[in-house]
Amino acid sequence: MGRPAGWLKELTGRSAMISPGAPKTRRSIERRFWKEIATGSSSEDAAGKVGVSAAVGARWFRQGGGMRTIELTEPGGRYLSFPEREEIAVLHAQQVGVREIARRINRDPATISRELRRNAATRGGKLEYRASVAQWKAELMARRPKTAKLVANPKLRNYVQDRLSGDVCHPDGSIVAGPDVPAWKGRSKPRRADRRWVTAWSPEQISHRLEIDYPEDESMRISHEAIYQSLFIEGRGALKRELVACLRTGRSLRVPRARSKNKPQGHVTEDVVLSERPAEAADRAVPGHWEGDLIIGTNRSAIGTVIERKSRAMLLVHLPRLDGYGQTPRVKNGPALAGYGAVAMNAALTASMTTLPQQLRKTLTWDRGKELSGHAQFTVETGTKVFFADPHSPWQRPTNENTNGLLRQYFPKGTDLSRWTAQDLEAVALAVNNLPRKVLDWKSPAEVFAEQLQSLEQEGVASTD
């Protein structure tokens, strides 16, 4: 004969709960995990720091698509915490009364009484209070699932999907087939391989375009972050996960930007990462801080570009082929004869920078290319301290990236850059440096740089020693 209907509610004051399985890891541990991820830790390292297995950490990261799936702010003090529940469990096992427990943990007796009744384990038909089970039950009941906007609004969902993954069409409306691509396997886009041709609007473009296309319809609004969450986080159900292949990055997981920051690798040591660069270099108030990079052409040809942050003045570094290039087979770990190996790069860059007064060559910010792996010797010869931007962070060298875009008018991608002489590069640099710039109140970089030189001469400190 079974138990009468409603026995559990009469016993605990709460209706029967459908068990979702074994109690999951406490949400406080998940919060700590995602906080570690936000600092740049890998999922394995973050899992180890919070006390769960690497497999659990990897699963949390994968299911979240690299995005946190939990609010990182801790619950307010009105809610019992896990340490408090542990204290309640110990005192209750010692048969301490409800009011005494309440006094010891500074809570209301009604809170303790309700906690012992509603969140106790009920296996065997008896109330047995365990902190882990109580925490699990409390977190389960505290969830307030909210229907995603893209699930509730089919019109909005169709709009987003069409702009994100719609077909590319001819002017007459016929669909362009594009290349044949393999089915999505849950991984990032293949490197150097065909991708499906789609309209490929970014979530931010979709979000802002809605305001133009539906100015009067407030239901047709969604943030770009909500679109990203629908794509990356499992269980949202609004957009299919394979649509991440339609994003321009093509990543199947979102990679926290902090992961790439300030991590020493190879020739980049802890003392030359971007965070160690003097603060005066960031605000552009003081001249003498430079940004540099290479523009690459075909047949392993390159030109060095160095731009002063305050004036936007540019130097082009000629990188000619070295003797023997193209005449002997390439040797693994042999000398770099293309012109921008570490030795050749140091020599060419030193020759260019030492033409400037010493007061105008304080720091140089480079990307993480191996061509400047000899930066220590370069610093000794020029007095210019080298710092390296974080990987995959071109926005940390904005002036350099912008100028390289201007230079592509003269040196397009897919062309051989080794055919240009040092005199040719000097002429192009002169032309670009004389372009008026909005950011300089329509002065040219050459004019602003000349003012900087004149200021040094008036102070009597200009020197190239």
Image (cartoon, rainbow, N blue to C red):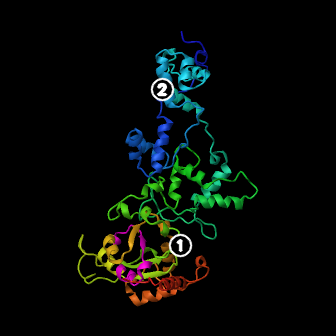
Q: Nearer the viewer, residue 326 or 277?
A: 277
Q: Indicate whether residue 354 is drawn in magenta.
A: yes
Quadrant (top left, top right, bottom left, bottom right) of the C terminus: bottom left
Q: Residue at x 60, y 32 (%)?
A: 78
Q: Are there few (<14), some (14-19), or many (20+) residues within 10 Å of tag 1?
A: few
Mark 1 sits on what residue?
A: 285
Q: Amino acid at mark 2?
A: Glu
Quadrant (top left, top right, bottom left, bottom right) of the N terminus: top right
Q: Amino acid at mark 1?
A: Ala
Residue 367 position in % (x across, y down): 41, 68
Residues drawn in magenta? 349-372
Residue 149 position in % (x across, y down): 65, 47
Q: Is residue 30 visible?
A: yes
Mark 2 sits on what residue?
A: 86
Quarter of the view holding residue 274: bottom left
Residue 17 position in % (x across, y down): 56, 25
Asked which secondary structure carries label 1, the reply is loop
